[in-house]
Amino acid sequence: MLLSKSEQYANGIGNSSGHVGHNFCEHIMGPSVTGLVKDLVGKPRTLDDGKPGSFYVPRFRNLTERHPKFIRGYGFEGDSGTKMFPSHAHSTPGYGSAYKKKVRDYAGAFIGMGAFGEVLPRFENYVDIDPELKDHWGIPVLRFNYRFGDNEKKMAEDMADSRGRCSRTRTLK
């Protein structure tokens, strides 16, 4: 609809209100933590049930009592296990056979968890068409104009407090 501007439809078809593209919402991704299960380093990898283990902690804020600093809520999700492309591979230093061995040895030995929360819709958060930039095929590129508000910033602070005061990587026994 944003690409449908013409003399007859200055804001595009169906956009006489000027609201198309506005109130864009995305999840706020909060703090995360990664743990290393030392006993699994160097062990043979197994698929067991054919998929990595994952878990979900559903929203628990603002269900019955309002939090004094923000509205809406957030949850946590995480995973572990062997994956086709180990998540730690991109941050493992090195190259060649030593690099590959280290990635294989540590595959399946990590468990991670991260927070994600609801973002309030605001007119100021919108997508529009870049008037100059075009993609490889000559199609105008979508431009994102987005900022988190005070509500999301306060929610992110609470996410960090709820997750505990963990270091970025912690060794599990």
Image (spheres, grey):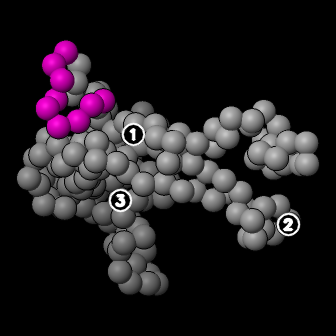
Amino acid of disc 3? Ala
Would you call the spot at circle 1 few (<14 residues within 10 Å), some (14-19), or many (20 or more)?
many
Say which quarter of the image contains residue 69.
top left
Q: Could you tell me which residue is drawn at 43 percent across and 74 percent down?
A: 100
Q: Residue 115, image x and y in percent?
A: 29, 44
Mark 3 or mark 2, earlier in chain: 3
Count of marks placed on residues = 3
The disc placed on residue 119 is: 1
Q: Could you tell me which residue is drawn at 46 percent across and 84 percent down?
A: 96
The disc placed on residue 138 is: 2
- The secondary element bearing badge 3 is classed as loop
Does 69 appear in magenta? yes
Q: Nearer the viewer, residue 159 or 86?
A: 159
Foreground label between 1 and 3: 1
Say which quarter of the image contains residue 141.
bottom right
Does 68 appear in magenta? yes
- The secondary element bearing badge 2 is classed as loop
Residue, disc 3: 107
Write the start and end of the magenta stretch as one range. Answer: 64-72
CA distance separating discs 1 and 3: 34 Å
Residue 134 sits above or below residue 49 on the image: below
Q: Residue furthest top?
A: 64
